[in-house]
Amino acid sequence: MPGKRNDVAIVGAAETTELGRIPSLSQIGLHADAALNAMRDAGLGPKDIDGIATAGETPTTIAHYLGITPKWVDGTAVGGCSFMIHVRHAAAAIEAGLCKTVLITHGESGRSGVARSRPAVSPGSLQGQFELPYGPMGPPTLFTIPVLRYMKTYGITEEQLATVAVVQREWAAKNPRATFRDPITVDDVLNSRMIAYPFRLLMCCLVTDGGGALILVSADRAKDFPQKPVYLLGTGESVETPMVSQMEDFTSSRAFRVAGPTAFAEAGIKHGDVDHLMIYDAFAHLPIYGLEDLGFCGKGEAAAFIGERNTAPGTGKLPLNTNGGGLSYMHSGMYGMYALQESVRQMRGVAPAQVPGARISVCHGVGGMFAASGTVIMTNEQGV
Amino acid sequence: MPEGQRPKPQPTPETQHFWDGTKSGELRLQRCNSCSKVYFPPRPFCPSCASRAVGVFAASGKGRLYSYVIHHRPVPGFTPPYAIAVVELDEGPRMMTNIVDCPQTPEALVLDMPVEVAFEKLDDDITLPLFRPSKS
């Protein structure tokens, strides 16, 4: 079964050399820059890689561009959590003996748009027939649609939504590579430009260029590499619907409720064991849904949990999105890879906003507009 | 008048009955003959029990405003700010739509308010099901 505890480790991890605005690199160039950095991090070359997984570009494109001859490929592309799912699939493949050394790449020219691939939605698809005619224009108008129902159900205010962005900016201030680092207040958020009521600009993620890559091997080889190994404890994945209007429950993600508990069950841990948490935050409501659907908070309690500074720097007992998240660190379009990179940094003990003594990190991703989900639980101790 | 045109749906063999319905003033849903599940969007089998024994029926066209956003940026065919809404039909399924005959403000767009279908003809092929506050 996938996720036999500690059987697979991450031994290479890196982001692109630059983050933010990178007009000098095309989208495959961003994949390659991140992959080269990750291979250097692991002390490996392209001839050492025998498995490849990617999204946004095809595995064929990236394998050819990097000079890799894989005997295992995975092109699962379900949005920003594809990379969490690649980690899960790669672990299963390594455990099954299908390959030994897997490279997972992400690169996206989200800001500069240099040779960016964007799948078109056919007017005959279900989204094309039953959502697009009503005027949505990308994630700010779709991902946000369930939120008024959530707010009415649980009595959550716009101020509470804004607080999510404020707390994450506090984490970003500690990260030299974060795009936005200046402190903000709830009033700043509520006075920022209206994008799609109730969402204002500072409740929405950045749009930047960047990439990241990971290298996975079996745990018994992990100590042969230069970096401190980060072991996989448990993983989970699911999908629900490509149409946000057809979510079963507007106050909760079914994909979250499958992926998260699957990963926790595989890892054999309790919520109290978690030292560090990443929840993919394309918009300010995502950490709220994630905290509840993963079981860290009861239904309707996550906004107050964040407001009471339980996830904040300093006093927070559950440090959340310690790079500043998609709201402040960076967001190329498929942010999941950057959440994974921050979890790896925390487990290596080298994060700019390091959580002292952190042993277990949960990294939870979303794909599409609540369409998909992937969860990866990591540890820096073999035999947890 | 807004500039440009809103994206036009392209019916498929499995959805043609829906678009034929809107053209003739009916909001058509499907019901499973095996398990009685009422569902949307259209497909020639039941998403609950996989039975192919399904039928089409004319829904009431009544529902309630379930959730929405009010978009403030320009989109071809729309004049911002405009609401992109989801209504929950009395028969159960939810669908995306726009709310017409109503100010596009949080004060006017009250969750759970009753709404009813208002058909908007785009051209000879396509009539969209929009919704307006119920008159009754």
Image (tube, coloured by chain):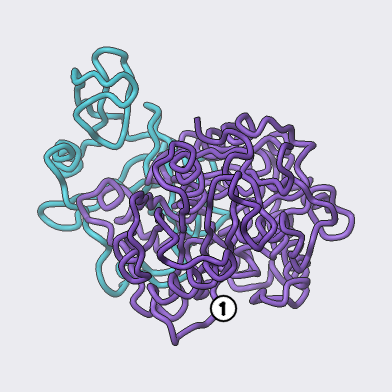
Chain colours: A purple, B cyan
Pointer 1 indicates a residue of which chain?
A: A
- Regarding residue A252, the answer to whether it shows in the image is no
Left or right relative to B46: residue A44: right
How would you rate the neighbour count of disc 1 (Cα within 10 Å): few for under 14, some for 14-19, many for 20 or more? some
Taking depth in this image into account, of A261 and B39 the one nearest to the observer is A261
Read off the residue under disc 1.
A17
> From the image, which quarter does the C terminus of chain A lie in?
top right
- In the orientation shown, which residue stands out farthest toward the bottom? A24
- In the orientation shown, which residue stands out farthest toward the top? B34
Q: Report how many numbered discs are placed on residues in the image.
A: 1
- In the orientation shown, which residue stands out farthest toward the front? A224
Determine the residue positioned at 58% across, 67% down.
A14
> For residue B80, what is the image quadrant?
bottom left
Determine the residue positioned at 64% across, 43% down.
A377
Query: Of the residues shown, which amino acid type is indicated by label 1?
Result: Thr
Where residue A64 sits: x, y (%)? 30, 67
Left or right relative to A248: residue A201: right
Q: What element carries label 1?
A: loop
Determine the residue positioned at 41% across, 44% down.
A245
Where residue B124 sits: x, y (%)? 10, 54
Taking depth in this image into account, of A129 and A168 the one nearest to the observer is A168
Left or right relative to B19: residue A192: right
* A336 over A244 or under it: above or below: below
- Regarding residue A183, the answer to whether it shows in the image is yes
Where residue B56 sits: x, y (%)? 20, 26
Where residue B76 sits: x, y (%)? 31, 70
